[in-house]
Image: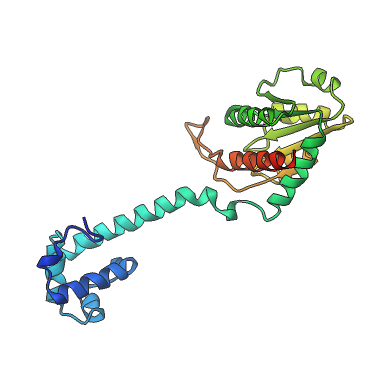
Amino acid sequence: MAFLGKVDFKNLTETEKVIYNYLRNNFEKIPRMHVRDIALEAHAGASSVMRLIHKLGYHSYYQFQEFVEKQQLKASTDSDIFQLLSASHYPSELIEKCRQLTEQVLKADSIIFFGLGTSGNICEYAMRRFATLGLNALSLTDMTYPLESHLLESQDSLIVVFSISGETGELIEILQHIRNREKVMIISITPKKESSLAQLSNLSINYKVEERRVNLYGDLTSQIPAIFITEVLSEMIFKSK
């Protein structure tokens, strides 16, 4: 399978090879071009262009254009998959904020990861990584857990909250109740920098992500940014210990 379809180069004339190379090098232009445009640009005849199209396995130039458009759409979709790994999805101050959080983590007697739903799954992951680094880490995904009794046992507590919406009612209510407690610092990791959660936090680390929901309550929002930030923090802590 060649770049533009099935083709046996041994059966192509020199003119057809020139046309083929032009099409390969100008792939993105093809949906907007007529046969005569290609012929003009490749310095060939329209009939030579069509002979090549047929040799590539297409019945018409229109069918060839459809193939090209589908390939371009697929390439665009494939590229979108990696957008979450792009630096443009994270604020310029991300590394500095992660450094600040790392300093607080190393000072804290306990680190409590707090979240619900898929964010709760990230809490479990973060807790395991931090515990592996020798830190006193706890994951809370149950809003009925007596959080205050745990805070009484610690000198310095760091509460790291993962949330996509930043507006989960039960979570906000609990944080409002403990936000003024001495030696308790609240950190939020959320895409919503203007959310209630971010406003309640001593430090908020934000990122860009598209919220996706199916059947109203099904959450398909990517957690890749939250995992990435967790990994960055883990690496910084590892190098600091």
Q: Quadrant of the N terminus?
A: bottom left
Left or right of 27: which side holds 124?
Answer: right
Residue toward you, 10 or 27: 10
Residue at 69% across, 39% down: 238
Picture coordinates of residue 42, whole percent (x, y): 23, 78
Quadrant in the rendering for residue 179: top right
Residue at 59% across, 55% down: 88
Picture coordinates of residue 223, whole percent (x, y): 56, 38
Quadrant in the rendering for residue 64: bottom left
Picture coordinates of residue 116, whole percent (x, y): 63, 27
Is residue 221 something that shows in the picture?
A: yes
Residue toward you, 172 or 43: 43
From what the image shows, is residue 135 above or below residue 166? Answer: above
From what the image shows, is residue 177 above or below residue 229? Answer: above
Residue at 21% across, 82% down: 43
Picture coordinates of residue 232, whole percent (x, y): 65, 43
Quadrant in the rendering for residue 123: top right
Q: Quadrant of the C terminus?
A: top right
Residue at 10% across, 66% down: 11
Left or right of 203: which side holds 67?
Answer: left
Is residue 35 something that shows in the picture?
A: no
Left or right of 170: which side holds 52?
Answer: left
